[in-house]
Image: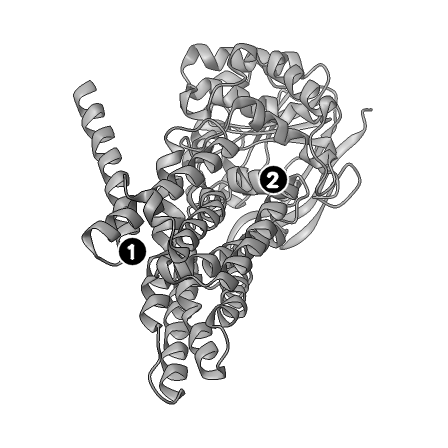
Amino acid sequence: MTMMPDLLAYEFIRNAFLAALLSSVACGIIGTYVVVKKIGYISGGIAHTAFGGIGLGYYLGVNPLLGVIPFSLAAALAIGLLSKKAGIAEDTAIGAFWAAGMAIGVIFIGLTPGYAPNLFSYLFGNILTVPAADLWLILLLDLLIISVVWLFSKEFLAISFDEEYARVSGLKTTLLDLLLLCLIALTVVIMVRVVGIVMVIALLTLPAAVARSFSRTLQGMMALAVLLSLSFSVVGLWLSYLLDVASGATIILVASVVFLTLNLATVLVRSKGR
Amino acid sequence: MNRVIIECDRLGVELDGMKVLDNLSLSVYEGDFLGIVGPNGGGKTTLLRVILGLQKPTSGTVTVFGKSPGQAAERIGYVPQRLFFDREFPISVLDIVLMGRLSGKKLLQRYDRKDRMKALEAIELVGLSKLKDRRIGALSGGELQRALIARALAGAPELLLLDEPTASVDPEMKTTIYDLLEKLMQQLTIILVTHDTGMISSHVTRIACLNCSLDMHQAGSTLGRKTMDDLYHYPVDLVVHNEPSQQTPQPQ
């Protein structure tokens, strides 16, 4: 890692580290809820639906991230309400939005005259090209996510551990669930720049899943997940530089390798113990 | 006569077009320790869910503490079935028990010292003080069960509802749990749903046999000798044994 200090002289590298740090905060905190509530698939649905927003952003000629915000929030609310209130099977609702969002994105991009630059980076992320303006947006969303989670920590713990008990205790569990889905939607917005829509689900689940094995409390799991997510991003970024390959994909692969190795090791240790 | 705590009047519940409870009338009085037995699918858990306000009745009425279900959360402690919990969840015994204080808290209000004190008292009552910081995954089945009972007690309820608290718990732990309930019945009204027909008869003040499934035949043969006829004729029957001095509706 000796070349790290030299690398930090470049602004785009500094921005990349900032992006890794800021996105890891959201990812570790919200990813923890995604893992303990087992809603990874919903998160994937929200992320893919958001592609419609990117298409809309291109079509209107504005920052595509600004298109992602309404699309992912709408997807979160719609999937949540459809599966909770309308009696539609959750995976069906997710599948419908997942595909429809992608389709809307494709059509808008088709309607946009000329070539769509950077499209690839929204799909698969490019942490090296995060503009300073987006870093501010990410920071703002981070602060929003942290405040809401801090305010609702008791309620979110209750609906995650035992939703029925939370309801019996008089909590408005549907509203709280929707609020949590909206936080996931905002996390998706943050992650789009770093790992892209297609791979958001991995950074939302893998660091938290690894952290869970070593944590006694939900807060502990969040802190560890943030650290792990940051480590995966930095190591992935460094490897992608060394090997000259795509950064988003390398980050995901680092996370996946750690996750799989750890689980494989656990399985081996357990089977030896028997 | 003791105060009425729960009043079910010709209660009926249909789930997905299936009658789960039918024409059920029941009064529970202050100080009762009511055991509800019956086969799987007999509607035992559904009855608890109606009392808790989690399930709306299709017909009939229910009042709990004179209000409609769900309106008296602070006065009810609930112990759900232990087997549904995710043992990988990173949460300590104390954090689980603190949830018992939720119903007395406002949104955004944090747990304070009094909540912690009440939670620790409840943990001590069920004998888990040494394990209060232990993670849920490192507890035995019986220990988790007692943690869930502590959670229900932390809110200082007047009515305690337990759903199969002794399912897949070893016999020694069963005795511990029943001893605990015996202690609690001095101060609380208790409703216990169980399969444990042998064990409960020596502890509870009344037993209700509940069955709304089509295989009531088996239930009848194991539970109520005299009530076989009734069980054949009616999809739901509530049979009361060992009834002390209180009046309870009998199935016709």
Left or right of B29? Residue A242 is: left
**Residue linked to disc 1:** A247
Sequence-wise, the earlier of marks 2 and 1 is: 2
Q: Which residue is mark 2?
A: A153
Residue at disc 2, secondary structure? helix
> Mark 2: few, some, or many residues within 10 Å (few <14, many ≥20)?
some
State how the image is colored.
Answer: one colour
Question: Quick one: B16 or A141, which is closer to the camera?
Answer: A141
Q: Is residue A99 above or below residue B127?
A: below
User: Horizontal and vertical percent for residue B183?
Assistant: 65, 11
Where on the picture, by quarter, is residue A36? top left
Q: Mark 1 belongs to which amino acid? A: Ser
Question: A114 or A258, which lies in front?
Answer: A114
Q: Which structural element holds mark 1?
A: helix
Between disc 2 and disc 1, the foreground one is 1
Is circle 2 on the same chain as circle 1?
yes
Quadrant, the N terminus of chain A:
top left
Q: Nearer the viewer, residue A207 or B156?
A: A207
| Crowdedness near tag 1: few (<14), some (14–19) or many (≥20) residues, C-alpha within 10 Å | many
Question: Which percent across, then down, holds residue B204?
Answer: 61, 19
**In the image, what residue occupies the spot 51% across and 24% down?**
B92
Relative to A13, residue B202 above or below:
above
Q: Which amino acid, by three-letter code, is at mark 2?
A: Ser
> Is A222 on the left or on the right of A236, as rendered?
right
For the C terminus of chain A, give its image quadrant.
top left
The residue at the point 43 percent across, 59 percent down is A90
- Is residue A89 visible in the rendered image? The answer is no
Q: How many angstroms separate mark 2 from mark 1 (CA)?
A: 33 Å
